[in-house]
Image (cartoon, grey):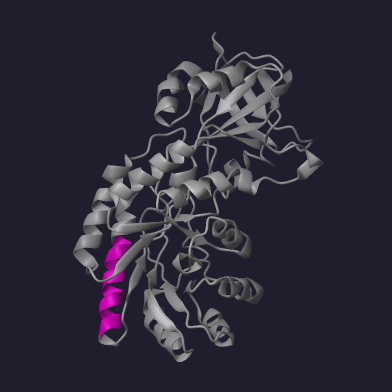
């Protein structure tokens, strides 16, 4: 059973995240406010970037565009000195509007259509990831010298919330042969890549993967390959309804493992997405309907699973529910605006009673939310308001 959080309890943390709480409170109580509305704090984007960079000083940050491709997020990362992890033509075009050198990007998608591959190469991207021989065969069409990382996977006792090793990553035993095939194709084996999953709260998974990378680098050395780069992926946790480890404490064993196992001449990069993008965004949604059904109060919101709350389905997230109402908490349900009965976000929520027209706020809705929204029922999607 989940309880809502009072607006007053999140004010202090909101100020720390660079949000003007007085402006948010004014929006929250504004009767004619058009919702759903996503409030975006560029300052919090920068604070998250800086916090992770301090926690992993050896690692160059390449923000993964996929969880949030809003131009404000992209420009703030670029302004802080970051680069980008891209997976499609659209993401490449988005980040190139900053003026960044395309040669600094990493195209981390292990399986690309030939059309996507062609677009990336034509735009000047030169660093790619593969995890199978069929992908290497696509390299033969390019005369440009490309730098190729091999993505491998490891076995872990504890998995991340979203297991990104299920779909991608070769076995450790396959890495050396793939490196040979890359060199035979006329391109450069450049290094290794892993991604242990998204919203991982187990730092030991990174340590195990870095240790595996060390073993692989030794084998590659003996076979005459020069490992130039290690990409440790993303997956750093952000706080939703449940607390997560502090990023400095979380990254400490990761940094130690890098210093112990990865020699100084090898560049290390990372692809954080969620950690950078989640907390800077707050959703304001309005109650458009109310009913009592089976002993519960049902509130129908103007946003749901087919839009911003898509992260509940695709990302297994539960976003903190924030209200400015007082009074006893009553057993309630929050449902979306579509005609589909599947469109229910919270069942068993304890929250003070609300009325039609009232607003409810949801924090940390910046990652894998708006980007996964659909056009189902042709309903209005949440729009962004940048809180400078």
Looking at the image, which is closer to me, 254 or 341?
Answer: 254
Question: Residue pushed farthest bottom?
Answer: 184
Q: Residue at x 54, y 50 (%)?
A: 67
| 364, above or below 257, in the image | above
Looking at the image, which is closer to me, 189 or 311?
Answer: 189
Residue 284, located in which quarter of the rendered image?
Answer: top right
Question: Residue pushed farthest left?
Answer: 260
Residue 48, located in which quarter of the rendered image?
Answer: top left
Q: Magenta: predominant secondary structure element?
A: helix
Q: Residue at x 75, y 45 (%)?
A: 375
Q: How many marks?
A: 0
Left or right of 160 in this view: 302? right
**Rendered location of residue 251, percent (x, y):** 29, 49
Left or right of 201 in this view: 127? right
Question: Residue pushed farthest top?
Answer: 327
Task: Give the magenta-colored segment's residue range.
Answer: 208-221
**Rendered location of residue 14, percent (x, y):** 45, 27
Tell me if I can see residue 301 in this picture. yes
Question: Residue pushed farthest front?
Answer: 99
Q: Residue at x 60, y 30 (%)?
A: 346
């Amino acid at each position: 059973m989940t309880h809502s959080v009072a607006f007053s309890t999140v004010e202090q943390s909101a100020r720390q995240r660079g949000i003007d709480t007085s402006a948010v409170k004014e929006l929250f109580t504004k009767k004619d406010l058009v919702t759903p509305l996503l409030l975006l704090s560029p300052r919090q984007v920068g604070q998250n970037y800086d916090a992770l960079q301090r926690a992993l000083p050896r690692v160059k940050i390449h923000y993964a565009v996929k969880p949030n491709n809003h131009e404000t997020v992209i420009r703030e990362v670029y302004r802080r000195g970051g680069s980008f992890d891209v997976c499609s033509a659209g993401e490449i075009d988005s980040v190139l509007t900053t003026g960044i050198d395309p040669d600094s990007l990493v195209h981390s998608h292990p399986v690309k259509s030939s059309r996507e591959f062609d677009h990336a190469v034509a735009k000047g991207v030169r660093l790619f990831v593969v995890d199978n021989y069929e992908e290497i065969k696509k390299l033969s069409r390019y005369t440009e010298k490309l730098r190729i990382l091999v993505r491998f996977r490891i076995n872990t006792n504890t998995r991340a919330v979203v297991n990104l090793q299920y779909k991608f990553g070769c076995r450790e035993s396959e890495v050396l042969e793939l490196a040979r095939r890359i060199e035979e194709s006329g391109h450069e084996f450049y290094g290794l890549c892993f991604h242990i999953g998204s919203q991982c709260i187990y730092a030991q998974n990174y340590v195990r993967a870095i240790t595996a990378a060390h073993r692989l680098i030794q084998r590659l050395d003996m076979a005459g390959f020069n490992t130039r780069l290690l990409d440790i992926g993303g997956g750093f946790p952000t706080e939703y309804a449940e607390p997560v480890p502090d990023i400095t404490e979380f990254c400490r064993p990761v940094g130690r493992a890098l210093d112990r196992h990865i020699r100084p001449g090898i560049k290390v990069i990372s692809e954080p997405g969620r950690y950078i993008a989640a907390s800077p965004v707050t959703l304001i949604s309005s109650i458009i309907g109310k009913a009592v059904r089976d002993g519960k109060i049902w509130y129908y919101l103007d946003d749901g699973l087919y839009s911003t709350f898509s992260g509940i389905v695709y990302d297994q997230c539960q976003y903190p529910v924030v209200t400015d109402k007082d009074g006893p908490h009553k057993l309630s349900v929050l449902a979306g605006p579509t005609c589909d009965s599947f469109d229910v976000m919270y069942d068993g929520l304890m929250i003070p009673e609300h009325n039609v027209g009232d607003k409810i706020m949801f924090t940390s809705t910046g990652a894998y939310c708006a980007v996964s929204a659909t056009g189902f029922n042709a309903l209005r999607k949440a729009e962004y308001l940048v809180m400078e």
